[in-house]
């Protein structure tokens, strides 16, 4: 369970959102909504310890989330940037990620699900934007954590890949995972999701 308690985000002299509180339970999907510049990315980065929380508190199962928290190991973060080494082949990227978690046995499942066998021996920089996104998203299956936090995960995906990813998210939530994502495309939201709207006075809709 991730809990945000009275979180205020300030950029320079501007308050992006104020006193944001919500709970993302196990087995739930939470969609962070808001206009460009509303603080969606800042909030997600705070949830994984990349941006310190100056006002309020964010916890995972009661432990405050910071870059050095032990609970960070139970979170997979997919940012709006793919965070892949441009000059490595896809197979090398997957092996590197798997080795950091001791999860080499999970590479085949990620390759099969995202159909990466077609690009395994291609350097990342030579891939299309859609393939780059699928390589980045494969961390979800390789890291195999309980919490997934994603910033615009559907960006650059074709309609078939969007449907595939939506099904993966739904399945993980049904199995007890906690899913939090920012999504600017209304068509990609989930009917059963909790929606957190970032505004000067945030409101949470069930």
Image (spheres, rainbow, N blue to C red):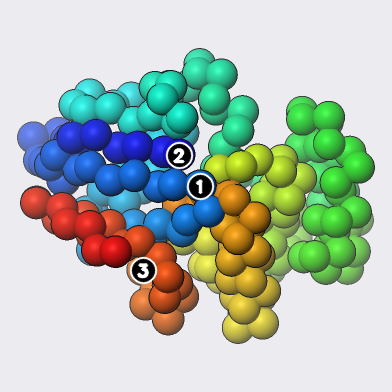
Q: Evaluate whether residue 27 shows in this view.
A: yes
Residue 65, compared with residue 8, is above or below; it is: above
* Mark 2 residue crowding within 10 angstroms, few (<14) / some (14–19) / many (20+): some
Crowd class of label 3 (few under 14; some 14 to 19; many from 20; radius 10 Å): some
State which tag comes first along the sequence, 2 or 1.
2
Identify the disc placed on residue 26: 1
Left or right of residue 1: residue 124? right
Tell me the distance, in whole angstroms, between the alpha carbons under discs 2 and 1: 6 Å
Helix, strand or loop at mark 3: loop
Q: From the viewer's perspective, is the residue at label 3 or at label 2 nearer? A: 2
Separation of residues labelled 3 and 1 (CA atoms): 23 Å
User: Label 1 neighbourhood size at 10 Å, few (<14), some (14-19), many (20+)?
Assistant: some
Asked which quadrant contains residue 182, the reply is bottom left
Which residue is depicted at the point 40% across and 47% down?
24
Q: Quadrant of the N terminus?
A: top left
Residue 32 located left or right of residue 90: left
Element type where label 1 sits in the image: loop
Quarter assignment of residue 58 = top left
The spot of residue 196 in percent (x, y) is 28, 57
Q: How far apart are marks 3 and 2 (CA)?
A: 24 Å
Judged left or right of residue 23, residue 93 is: right
User: Looking at the picture, how far across and down is residue 18, in whole percent?
Assistant: 12, 42
Labels 2 and 1 touching (C-beta < 8 A): yes
Q: Which residue in the structure is indicated by mark 3?
A: 184
* Residue 86 visible in the snapshot: no
Residue drawn at (83%, 29%) of the image: 102
Tag 2 residue: 1
- Residue 195 relative to residue 188: left or right: left
């Amino acid at each position: 369970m991730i809990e945000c308690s009275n979180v205020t985000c300030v950029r320079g002299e501007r308050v992006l959102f104020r006193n944001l509180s919500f709970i993302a339970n196990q087995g739930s999907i939470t969609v962070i909504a808001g206009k460009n510049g509303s603080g969606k990315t800042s909030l997600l980065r705070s949830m994984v310890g990349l941006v310190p929380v100056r006002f309020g508190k964010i916890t995972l199962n009661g432990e405050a989330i910071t870059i050095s928290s032990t609970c960070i190991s139970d979170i997979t973060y997919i940012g709006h940037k793919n965070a892949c080494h441009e000059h490595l082949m896809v197979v090398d990227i997957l092996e590197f990620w798997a080795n950091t978690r001791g999860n080499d046995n999970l590479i085949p499942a990620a390759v099969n699900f995202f159909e990466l066998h077609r690009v395994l021996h291609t350097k990342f920089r030579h891939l299309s934007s859609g393939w780059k996104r699928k390589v980045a998203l494969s961390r979800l299956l390789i890291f195999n954590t309980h919490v997934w936090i994603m910033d615009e995960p559907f960006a650059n995906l074709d309609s078939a890949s969007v449907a595939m990813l939506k099904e993966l998210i739904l399945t993980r939530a049904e199995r007890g995972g906690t899913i939090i994502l920012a999504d600017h495309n209304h068509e990609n939201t989930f009917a059963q999701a909790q929606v957190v709207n970032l505004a000067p006075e945030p409101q949470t809709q069930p």
